[in-house]
Image (spheres, rainbow, N blue to C red):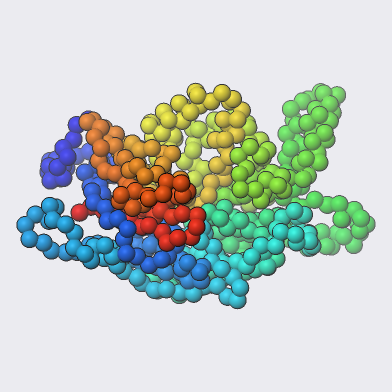
């Protein structure tokens, strides 16, 4: 329980003792209890960019220009300076107040064409090839007519383009365009990357586009799941339509909706063996709610593995709403190879919540993500996170609303959590209302956010304070903060901004 706070002592202990089998990586990560950011440079002189995130391998810092026209990529370096006597007691040199002392710019590249803008909240990283996926789009049209099979009530965007960038040198390798469509780009909601497979959800046309990112840097269409599920479905229907009346063909549901309705029907059918009870069950549970099932649209999707998708269905209003926590919704597991729905749950189902509670990490589908991603704390792998969930569950006055709130996060947003060891709840304790591994803006506070050692003697190890060193001069102004933690180094950026588009206040927290 008690470990030395001296790094040299801990290294010596590591030389003369061996950890238990299978625990060497956990043992090594405990060194972060000693290696923490202990110095802050407030209000760093930096370019007026939108700072997005570090890549999961820590090689690149992704930024966007304020006019949403350019991608700027930096390489994290380290402050280098000399001093007389004890460097820890001396003030930092003036150059330390500059952003360029910690990061070197690799390049700046323009992505949008014509009237498109970069989506500042969208970025996916493919580590195996060090490719970055960015998105640009034109403005939304909210009163677009539902032409060509589009869903009524869903906005339209004239052009959405996904750009595949080689991060080493900024070369655009390929792009994929969608016209007069709607894809939710905020916080990577509308796209999910798993290994080399990319799923993009068209809300307007209710299609899941599966693409493959080749090693050569090409975006290749694999399949489109929606109107059709198999590659030859359209050919089969077109050939059969010659022998079927046109009005009958017009009543067909999409392939994915037909699979869903069939699965629900069979599930209710198999609940009873008595013919009379079976008919009554179908009337109450299927036909009574039939139109509700028909009206469901795909909201969101994620990979569970290379063959299975977790698909969220709900109402049209919920699909374009920012807050869907209390909206009625359903979750389905779909096998892309067999084109079958293999499971279907309402978002208040206790059975699904139990799976969520016990196998939380399986829903994150980390695939071949960096090894550090395996240490993102959750109630499935961390006793402290599990205890925290149990306390929230015990305090909940309504179990149904609690389950809905917990399951609202499914499907997960892709690459939405930081693998930084400082968010490892086995090592540190912190206020998750103010800061967490999840990539989200948070309401800012003038008080420092404390990271306390989890083990004895439970001392304060370091603090992260966003905003000016002396605090804000006007407490009435609403401020939000975001935090970018390097996945390996004791290095973090805190960015505080107001809603009035004033330049952000950037602080750099590092180990001196």
Query: Which is more toward the observer, 61 or 67?
Result: 67
Task: Give the camera-side residue of 188 and 352.
Answer: 188
Q: Is residue 291 visible?
A: yes
Whole-percent x and y of residue 495? 39, 55
Where residue 463 appears, x then y in whole percent? 29, 44
Residue 162, above or below 510? below
Q: The N terminus lies in which quarter of the figure? A: top left
Snapshot quadrant of residue 279:
top right
Residue at the left extreme of this rendering? 85
Residue at 39%, 70% (x, y): give it: 168
Above-or-below relation of 170 to 350: below
Residue 225 visible? The answer is no
Q: Nearer the viewer, residue 414 or 256?
A: 414
Residue 255: image location, x then y, percent:
75, 52
**Which residue is at a point 53% across and 66% down the rendered structure image?**
118
Q: Position of residue 207 (x, y in %)?
A: 68, 56
Q: Name which residue lies at 12% across and 46% down.
A: 8
Relative to 198, say whether 214 is above or below: below
* Residue shown at 68% from the left, 67% from the top: 158
């Amino acid at each position: 329980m008690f470990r030395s706070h001296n790094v040299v002592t801990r290294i010596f202990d590591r030389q003369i003792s061996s950890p238990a089998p299978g625990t060497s990586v956990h043992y090594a990560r405990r060194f972060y209890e000693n290696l923490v950011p202990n110095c802050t440079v407030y209000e760093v002189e930096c370019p007026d960019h939108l700072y997005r995130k570090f890549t999961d391998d820590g090689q690149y810092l992704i930024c966007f220009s304020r006019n949403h026209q350019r991608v700027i990529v930096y390489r994290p370096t380290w402050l280098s300076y000399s001093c007389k006597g004890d460097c820890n007691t001396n003030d930092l040199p003036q150059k330390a107040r500059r952003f360029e002392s910690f990061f070197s710019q690799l390049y700046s590249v323009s992505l949008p064409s014509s009237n498109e803008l970069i989506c500042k909240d969208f970025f996916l990283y493919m580590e195996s090839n060090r490719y970055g996926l960015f998105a640009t789009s034109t403005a939304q049209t909210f009163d677009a007519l539902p032409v060509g099979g589009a869903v009524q009530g869903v906005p339209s965007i004239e052009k959405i383009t996904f750009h595949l960038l080689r991060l080493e040198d900024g070369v655009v390798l390929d792009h994929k365009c969608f016209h007069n469509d709607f894809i939710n780009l905020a916080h990577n909601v509308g796209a999910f990357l798993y290994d080399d497979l990319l799923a993009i959800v068209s809300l307007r046309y209710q299609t899941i586009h599966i693409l493959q990112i080749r090693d050569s840097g090409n975006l290749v269409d694999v399949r489109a799941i929606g109107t059709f599920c198999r590659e030859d479905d359209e050919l089969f229907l077109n050939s059969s339509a010659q022998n079927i009346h046109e009005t009958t063909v017009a009543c067909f549901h999409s392939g994915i909706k037909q699979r869903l309705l069939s699965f629900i029907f069979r599930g209710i059918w198999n609940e009873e063996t008595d013919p009379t009870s079976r008919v009554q069950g179908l009337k109450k549970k299927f036909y009574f709610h039939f139109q509700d099932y028909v009206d469901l649209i795909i909201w969101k999707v994620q990979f569970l593995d290379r063959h299975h998708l977790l698909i969220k269905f709900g109402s049209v209003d919920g699909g374009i709403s920012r807050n869907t926590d209390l909206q009625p919704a359903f979750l389905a597991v779909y096998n892309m190879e067999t084109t079958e729905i293999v499971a279907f749950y309402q978002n208040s189902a206790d059975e699904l919540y139990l799976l969520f509670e016990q196998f939380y990490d399986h829903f994150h589908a980390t695939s071949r993500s960096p090894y550090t991603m395996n240490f993102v704390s959750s109630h499935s792998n961390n006793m402290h996170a599990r205890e925290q969930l149990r306390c929230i569950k015990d305090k909940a006055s309504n179990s149904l609303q609690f389950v809905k709130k917990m399951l609202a996060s499914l499907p997960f947003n892709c690459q939405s959590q930081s693998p930084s060891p400082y968010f490892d709840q086995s090592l540190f304790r912190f206020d998750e209302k103010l800061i967490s591994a999840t990539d989200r803006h948070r309401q800012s506070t003038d008080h420092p956010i404390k990271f306390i050692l989890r083990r004895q003697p439970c001392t304060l190890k370091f603090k992260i304070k966003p905003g000016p060193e002396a605090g804000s001069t006007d407490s009435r102004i609403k401020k939000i903060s975001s935090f970018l933690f390097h996945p390996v180094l004791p290095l973090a950026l805190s960015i505080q901004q107001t809603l009035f588009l004033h330049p952000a206040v950037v602080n750099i927290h590092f180990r001196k």
